[in-house]
Image (tube, rainbow, N blue to C red):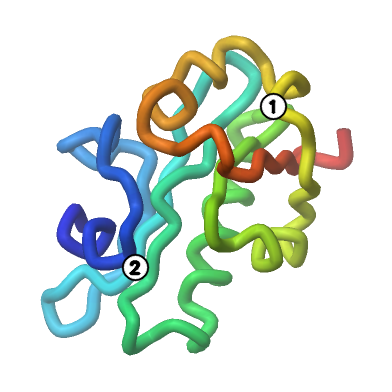
Amino acid sequence: MLSLLAAAGLPALGVSPTLDHFLVAEKAGQVVGAVGLEFYGPDALLRSAVVSQDLRGSGLGGVLIARLLAQAEARGVRGVYLLTTTAERYFPRFGFERIDRAEIPEAVRQSDEFREACPASAVAMRRMVGGR
């Protein structure tokens, strides 16, 4: 998964080596897609959404994200947040909207992703879960 993130130019900082709370797709023994959640109290950070170059546009990324959001809802997560430098137009189809970083809960802003991995120019987005 780390090589897939590197190939896509995505940060690996803070990705757990045990892959807890990550969904991973494999094809012929190779990781071809992944997406993860980090939990911060009632909120979560969606991170490391990646699909191998040859499978982009296949719908795999959407399946992984939809499953991850269903898991977040089942867990009682209130809001899911993310940062992106390249996919601002992709995530609204899953209910994400662009927000100001100041609207992000402090606990989420203390994550490695926010503090170190993503540039200040990254777009912040939020999806409220469970109709809340």
User: Identity of the amino acid at label 1?
Assistant: Arg
Q: Quadrant of the N terminus?
A: bottom left
The residue at the point 54 percent across, 33 percent down is 120
List the residue tagged with mark 1: 101
Q: Which mark is residue 33?
A: 2
17 or 86: nearer the eye?
Answer: 86
Q: Mark 1 or mark 2, which is nearer to you?
A: 1
Amino acid on which the number 2 mark rests in the picture: Gly
| Residue at far right of view | 131
83 vs 10, left or right, is right
Question: Residue at 70% across / 42% down in the picture?
Answer: 125
Give coordinates of residue 102: x percent, y percent.
Answer: 74, 19
* Dot 2: element: strand
Q: Is residue 104 left or right of residue 51?
A: right
- Counting other residues with Cα less than 10 Å from the Cα at mark 2, is it few (<14), some (14-19), or many (20 or more)? many
Left or right, 4 with reference to 70: left
Indicate the quadrant containing the C terminus: top left, top right, bottom left or bottom right. Answer: top right
Q: Where 6 sits versus 16, above or below?
A: below
Q: Residue at x 18, y 37 (%)?
A: 18
The tag on residue 27 is none
